[in-house]
Amino acid sequence: SLSVFWIVGSVLRSDEQKALRRDVHKVVQTYAGKRGTEEYFSGPTGRVAVQLYDSGGSLFVGSSPAFERPTSALPQEVVLAAKFDSQDWRGRIGGIRVQAGLAPFDMGVVAVISDMSYIGNVVRRIGRVLFFTAVSLILLSGVIGYWVAGFAIQPITRLATIATKMGPMRLT
């Protein structure tokens, strides 16, 4: 149960990061004029935000007012590192766990950011189901084990009962 819990959580986070990587490259291609704006982004939640940073690593604009605030900016060192190569980032923005894909483009850096709270909720629900399943299986295996052990020692119990009835003088 613990391994399934860990695997599901890491797979969900990994899939989200791959989708963010694809989306950030689509945004870069759109701004570079290589792709039409009619194509939709493939993020699994649909709850992504886009931020544009200037070449100095300062937040220029966000896709929603909540992501235009200075407190919603990614760490400047992460943005500056993304000027030369695409980057993945996980952390907190305004107390919310997020994942981001960053990529360079002509005017600076593009970041596509996803709120990761839904993955935490899914993993917690899966964890509860796995916990109750594990407890149920442990109890069931205890009952079955007790029954099998009782069945297995019946011949020994029968011999002990017969030996007790015979007494200590009739050992043959």
Image: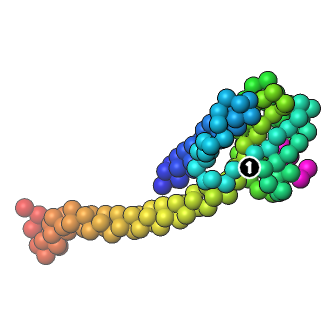
Image x and y of residue 27, in percent: 70, 37
Outermost residue toward the top?
A: 84
Indicate left or right for 17 with 158 as reference. right
Indicate left or right for 40 with 130 as reference. right
Which corner quadrant of the image does residue 18 belong to? top right
* Amino acid, disc 1: Ala
Which corner quadrant of the image does residue 64 belong to? bottom right
Quadrant holding the C terminus = bottom left
Residue 93 colored in magenta in the image: no
Q: Which residues are magenta?
A: 69-74
Residue identifier under label 1:
49
Q: Residues within 10 Å of mark 1 (few under 14, many from 20)?
A: some
Image x and y of residue 102, in percent: 74, 36
Indicate left or right for 171 with 47 as reference. left
Which residue is found at the position 21% from the left and 62% from the top? 152
Which corner quadrant of the image does residue 117 belong to? bottom right
